[in-house]
């Protein structure tokens, strides 16, 4: 038995991770930003520690985590959000003498996590991706000449689509870019991939020796906002081409550990293009667990040096995020002809991100927290690609 600390354990992805770890006989400690969250009220944690509000990139947060490691006799750290994953990679040398974890070196981490650097790697190796180039206020015209308009301004480092804005002209880009850079830092300009193609996620767990022990491809069948937001319904699919392409990117990076890719099919040419890497378990990771791929157990076994199982994904597992799926239903003109049907709430291989009957409280408190976010006008605008007032 190991004691596992989940950083950012308040997140929705903590739910299947905690359930897996407890079933495997491990002790679970979670670090949370708030009590009003999915992870905090789950039945599975053995201990919960609230972050007083320290930013992940601060010295205070490092001291806070070091205190948790000591106070709870932690054996393994597993980060569940972008900022906590970056924290572990950044402090890799400091942490590895104290605790076990899986993370690429910081330089490798940033080559995959930074959108511009990842797109440069794809361009240099003929891997399908949208035309993407660095942009600042002095290069808007030349950058736009490469990508064309309309285009997306994307912060190099961001999560959940925050800070991304669709611009139709160079003049519009010049108008909004300073505010985006002021809040998020360096940015890229990326050609706009029109609606009409499929969207996918691809997950891998890659060893330091270069072997992918588990790979899962998920198709986003519905997302909110409908033109391209967060997935509210997805299903596992068998797609070897996506597995090969994304695994090649990890090989070129020299990545170790878990990585999650976002991909979009371009309806103009049918190519499936890599958009970004998320260096942690995504919110929809339960679909992989229910499809037979236990990434949490694999992570812990890898850290402990236990024999490693190669997992195979079962296609056809459907995962719904009911809160967002309800918003999709209210907004979409396709509400009565969706595939899979919006009205299929139960049945074989239908699951929910927010929890289950065996762990009901996360649904209540997590949904409340999510509703508060959706009521925030600036949050909704940031998710939809519209600049806040």
Image (tube, grey):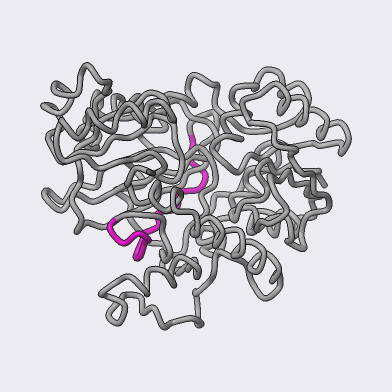
| Residue 220 located within the stretch drawn in magenta | yes
* Total labels drawn: 0
Asked where in the image residue 236 lies, by quadrant, the reply is bottom left
Residue 27, magenta (yes or no): no
Residue 284 in sight from this viewpoint: no
Q: In this view of the protein, can residue 16 be seen by the observer?
A: yes
Give percent across and percent down for residue 106.
54, 21
Residue at image position (47%, 23%) is: 108
**What stretch of residues is rendered in magenta?**
211-227
Q: Is residue 239 left or right of residue 108?
A: left
**In the image shown, does 373 or 215 lie closer to the viewer?**
373
Nearest the eye: 300 or 311: 300
Q: Residue furthest front?
A: 389
Q: Is residue 49 left or right of residue 245?
A: right
User: In the rendered image, which quarter is residue 371 located in?
Assistant: bottom right
- Image check: 161 left or right of 191? right
Q: Where is residue 58 shown, x and y percent of the image?
A: 66, 24
Q: Is residue 364 left or right of residue 244?
A: right
Residue shown at 66%/40% (left/top)?
A: 78
**Residue 222 higher or lower than 349, as above or below:** above
Compared to residue 214, the image places residue 124 above or below, namely above
Give the image location of residue 148, x and y in percent. 12, 34
Q: Residue at x 46, y 24 (%)?
A: 110
State whether the magenta stretch is mostly helix, strand or loop: strand
Above or below residue 151? Residue 283 is below
Residue at the spot x=59%, y=56% of the render? 12
Q: Quadrant of the C terminus?
A: top left
Provide residue 237's location: percent of width, then percent of height. Answer: 37, 61
């Amino acid at each position: 038995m190991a004691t596992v600390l989940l950083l950012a354990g308040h997140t929705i992805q903590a739910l299947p991770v905690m359930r897996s770890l407890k079933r495997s006989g491990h002790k679970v400690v979670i670090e949370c930003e708030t009590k009003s969250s999915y992870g905090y009220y789950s039945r599975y944690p053995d201990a919960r520690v609230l972050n007083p509000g320290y930013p992940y990139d601060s010295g205070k947060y490092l001291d806070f985590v070091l205190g948790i490691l000591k106070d709870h006799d932690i054996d393994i750290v597993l980060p569940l959000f972008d900022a906590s994953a970056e924290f572990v990679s950044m402090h890799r040398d400091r942490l590895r003498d104290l605790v076990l974890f899986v993370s690429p070196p910081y330089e490798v981490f940033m080559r995959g996590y930074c959108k511009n650097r990842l797109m440069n790697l794809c361009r240099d190796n003929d891997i399908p991706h949208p035309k993407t180039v660095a942009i600042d206020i002095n290069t808007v015209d030349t950058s736009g000449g490469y990508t064309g308009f309309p285009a997306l301004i994307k912060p190099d480092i961001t999560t959940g689509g925050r800070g991304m804005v669709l611009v139709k002209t160079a003049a519009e880009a010049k108008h909004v870019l300073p505010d985006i850079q002021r809040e998020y830092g360096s940015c890229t300009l990326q050609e706009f991939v029109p609606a009409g193609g499929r969207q996918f996620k691809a997950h891998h767990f890659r060893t330091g020796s270069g072997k992918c022990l588990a790979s899962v491809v998920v198709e986003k069948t519905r997302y909110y906002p409908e033109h391209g937001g967060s997935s509210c319904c997805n299903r596992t699919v068998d797609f070897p081409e996506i597995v090969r392409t994304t695994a090649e990117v990890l090989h070129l990076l020299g990545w170790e550990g878990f990585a999650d890719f976002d991909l979009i099919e371009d309806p103009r040419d049918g190519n499936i293009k890599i958009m970004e890497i998320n260096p942690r378990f995504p919110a929809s990771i339960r679909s992989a667990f229910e499809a037979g791929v236990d990434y949490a157990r694999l992570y812990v076994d890898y850290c402990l040096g236990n024999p490693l199982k190669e997992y195979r994904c079962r296609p056809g597992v459907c995962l719904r995020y009911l809160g967002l799926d309800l918003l999709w239903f209210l907004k979409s003109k396709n509400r009565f002809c969706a595939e899979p049907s919006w009205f299929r709430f139960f049945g074989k291989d239908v699951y929910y991100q927010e929890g289950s009957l065996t762990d009901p409280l996360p649904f209540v408190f997590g949904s409340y927290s999510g509703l508060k976010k959706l009521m925030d006008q600036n949050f909704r605008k940031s998710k939809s690609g519209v600049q806040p007032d």
